[in-house]
Amino acid sequence: MTQQPQAVAEGKKVRPIVPFLRLGGNGEKPYLVGQKCAACGAVYIGSRVACGKCTATGPFNEIRLSGTGKLYVYTIVYQSVPGIKTPYVAGIVDLPEGVSVSCTVIDVEPDPRKLPFDMPLEMVTQKVREDKEGNDVIAFFFRPAR
Ligand SMILES: [Zn+2]
């Protein structure tokens, strides 16, 4: 499931870093999408061959996921690949649709005393790099809800 890049300026395009991120546009904010099992309603991130809950092989319908969630668990990462600033917080965020998403939690101190479980978070997007064609690559993050 590859998305076509969206034009934002003359010759310059943006691409989501993962296929389940929709960049919005025309006044719409970016959002994540899930795959919902038509048989039992279980929601997944990413494409599925079969439902892990009821074993149905589909159909799975795309649904828009909430832009807010709660911090389920996290780890503080002190070593990463070159070019990635450390320490940072790698978290798993529970969304109200019953699915969890793994992401970097930003705008927080990498300090367990300041990272309560169930902390309300909201999704934001940022350009993280340019691809080989010079298009902006957009990633999603969660930060404390404002
Ligand atoms: Zn199912």
Image (spheres, rainbow, N blue to C red):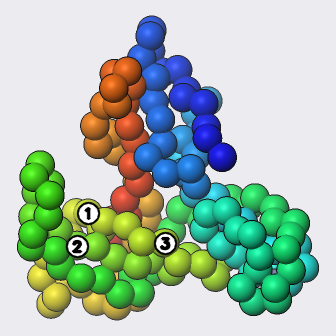
Q: Which amino acid does the dot numbered 3 rest on?
A: Val
Q: Residue at x 9, y 64 (%)?
A: 86
Secondary structure at badge 3 equals strand
Q: Earlier in the sequence, mark 3 or mark 1?
A: 3
Along the viewing direction, whichever of 104 and 108 lies nearer the viewer: 104
Q: Position of residue 118 (x, y in %)?
A: 40, 88
Q: Is residue 29 visible?
A: no
Which image quadrant is residue 54 in?
bottom right
Q: Position of residue 16 (x, y in %)?
A: 48, 42
Alpha carbon distance from label 3 to label 2: 14 Å
Specify the quarter for ligand 1. bottom right
Q: Earlier in the sequence, mark 3 or mark 2?
A: 2
The residue pinned by badge 3 equals: 101
Q: Which amino acid does the dot numbered 2 rest on?
A: Val
Q: Position of residue 97 (x, y in %)?
A: 66, 76
Q: Earlier in the sequence, mark 2 or mark 1?
A: 2
Alpha carbon distance from label 3 to label 1: 15 Å
Q: Position of residue 62 (x, y in %)?
A: 75, 58
Crowd band around label 2 with a 10 angstrom C-alpha radius: few (<14), some (14–19), many (20+): many
The residue pinned by badge 2 equals: 89
Disc 2 or disc 1, which is closer to the eye? 2
Alpha carbon distance from label 2 to label 1: 7 Å
Q: Residue at x 74, y 69 (%)?
A: 49
Secondary structure at badge 1 equals loop
- Do labels 2 and 1 touch, CB within 8 Å? yes
Along the viewing direction, whichever of 30 and 5 lies nearer the viewer: 5
Lateral position of residue 33 relative to residue 80, left or right:
right
The residue pinned by badge 1 equals: 106
